[in-house]
């Protein structure tokens, strides 16, 4: 019979996303996928998915039209670098802020 | 059953894995064992390895982790990024604690896989005596060393595996004077059940080697070269590219040793057929940490690589 106090005495963490907060705020550049060039989106078949494979933070989905979870994407750009069709472009995050005036 | 399809559960996937010799991007499971939003740096090579490695290990395993970048990555109280149990231990005791956990699992009659996952400092400098002991006792654990070639977690100090001439915060001007230790060779001298070298740029190769290691009894050692953008001085997006260049220039070779037989694997085996490899200069110029290397040192390095590969071409 385990000691009933065991649960109180340990400080075990519970698993969940975002232990460092919303890591999307670390990002300087945001990956944007061009669906006309993306291989699975263009052919309608499951192929390639290298962005999903190499993403260190598993924010890219393995769908026919891959989506990126911008809440947690740290903006490293590995997906853009590894995409064989050059379908992913890194665009400065500041461009997406409403009312941003970048001359 | 449809190996190319994507709608199957974990059991189906395991059957498919046993059927197909090689994993491809398409039949790699979509199930994730680590949550996004962890404390790893942007573009971390270890993040890729950890994510793909966990897919190969499955849910029935316990991790033993000494202080390293992985301690930071697995999460701080009260949230853990990893979905599996992780036991944190002191630097020097990794393999000893893994031995103890394995013994406890044996006592409970469970087949739970015990995985010790340490950095290069925790393996080559501080934890080597415990690892050597566990190797000698032939403990049934998997020991993974991710080698980012310095103490990255504490701020890029030189370690035993840092290559000669590398700039680190403790060798800031002319680079490290001493040559690096060849850890896989030290482990191989213990005659382990299974030894493999992997690279963060070939996660599927790592995945397949882990699947193989799971089936073998005895101590399985995996050594992985892991590019680290802040420590190596490169852009975050170059992580995978740099690791690939290290393999394609012949500087880091991927091999496995089973029953004392060495075999080059996948990406390195392909290089055997080529008459000339990419010059090592391409790899060195990608990183700030090699800025202090003189032309003479680079030529010596290139000559060593050429000699190594001439030997490989004769043997394999």
Image (tube, coloured by chain):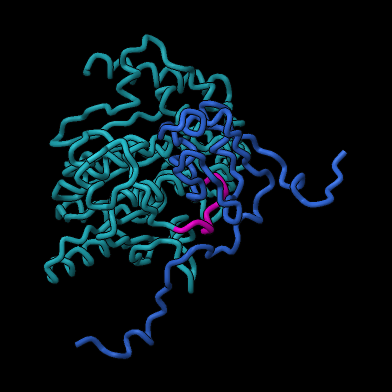
Rendering coords of residue A37 (x, y %): 56, 28
What tint does the image give chain A?
blue
State whether residue B287 appears in this view.
no
- In the image, residue A3 lies in the stretch drawn in magenta: no
Q: Is residue B190 left or right of residue A27?
A: left
Q: Is residue A23 left or right of residue B246?
A: right
Q: Residue at x 36, y 60 (%)?
A: B65
Q: Residue at x 14, y 55 (%)?
A: B137
Q: Residue at x 69, y 39 (%)?
A: A91
Q: Is residue B316 left or right of residue A80?
A: left
Magenta extent: B35-44
Q: Which chain is cyan?
A: B
Q: Is residue B285 above or below residue B272?
A: below
State whether residue B141 appears in this view.
yes
Residue closest to the eye, A36 or A18:
A36
Q: Is residue A90 left or right of residue A61?
A: right
Quadrant of the rendered image containing residue B174:
top right
Rendering coords of residue A31 (x, y %): 62, 41
Residue lying farthest to the front in this orientation: A44
């Amino acid at each position: 019979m385990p000691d009933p106090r065991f649960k109180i005495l340990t400080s075990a963490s519970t698993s969940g996303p975002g232990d460092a907060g919303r890591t999307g705020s670390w990002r300087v550049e945001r990956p944007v996928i061009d669906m006309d060039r993306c291989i699975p989106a263009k052919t309608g078949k499951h192929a390639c998915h290298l962005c999903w494979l190499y993403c260190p933070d598993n924010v890219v989905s393995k769908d026919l039209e891959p989506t990126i979870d911008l809440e947690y994407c740290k903006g490293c750009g590995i997906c853009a670098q590894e995409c064989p069709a050059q379908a992913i472009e890194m665009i400065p995050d500041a461009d997406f802020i409403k009312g941003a005036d970048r001359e | 059953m449809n190996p190319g399809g994507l709608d199957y559960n974990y059991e189906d996937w395991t059957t498919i894995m046993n059927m197909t010799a090689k994993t491809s991007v398409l039949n790699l499971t979509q199930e994730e064992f680590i949550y996004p939003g962890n404390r790893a740096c942007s573009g971390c090579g270890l993040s890729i390895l950890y994510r793909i490695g966990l897919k190969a290990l499955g849910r029935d395993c316990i991790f033993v982790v000494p202080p390293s970048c992985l301690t930071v990555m697995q999460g701080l109280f009260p949230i853990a990024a990893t979905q599996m149990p992780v036991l944190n231990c002191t630097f020097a005791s990794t393999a000893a604690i893994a031995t103890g956990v394995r013994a406890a699992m044996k006592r409970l009659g469970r087949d739970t896989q015990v995985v010790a996952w340490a950095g290069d400092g925790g393996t080559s400098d501080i934890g080597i005596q415990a690892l050597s002991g566990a190797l000698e006792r032939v403990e049934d654990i998997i020991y993974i060393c991710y080698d980012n070639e310095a103490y990255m977690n504490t701020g890029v100090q030189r370690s035993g595996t840092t290559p000669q001439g590398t700039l680190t915060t403790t060798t800031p001007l002319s680079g490290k004077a001493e040559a690096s230790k060849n850890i896989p060779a030290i482990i191989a001298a213990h005659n382990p059940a299974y030894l493999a070298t992997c690279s963060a740029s070939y996660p599927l190769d790592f995945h397949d080697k882990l699947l193989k290691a799971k089936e073998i009894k005895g101590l399985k050692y995996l050594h992985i070269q892991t590019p680290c953008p802040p420590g190596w001085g490169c852009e975050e997006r170059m992580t995978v590219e740099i690791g690939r260049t290290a393999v394609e220039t012949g500087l880091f070779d991927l091999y496995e040793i089973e029953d004392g037989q060495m075999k080059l694997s996948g990406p390195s085996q392909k290089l055997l057929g080529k008459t000339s490899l990419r010059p090592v200069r391409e790899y060195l110029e990608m990183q700030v940490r090699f800025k202090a290397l003189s032309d003479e040192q680079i030529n010596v390095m290139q000559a060593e690589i050429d000699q190594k590969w001439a030997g490989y071409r004769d043997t394999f």
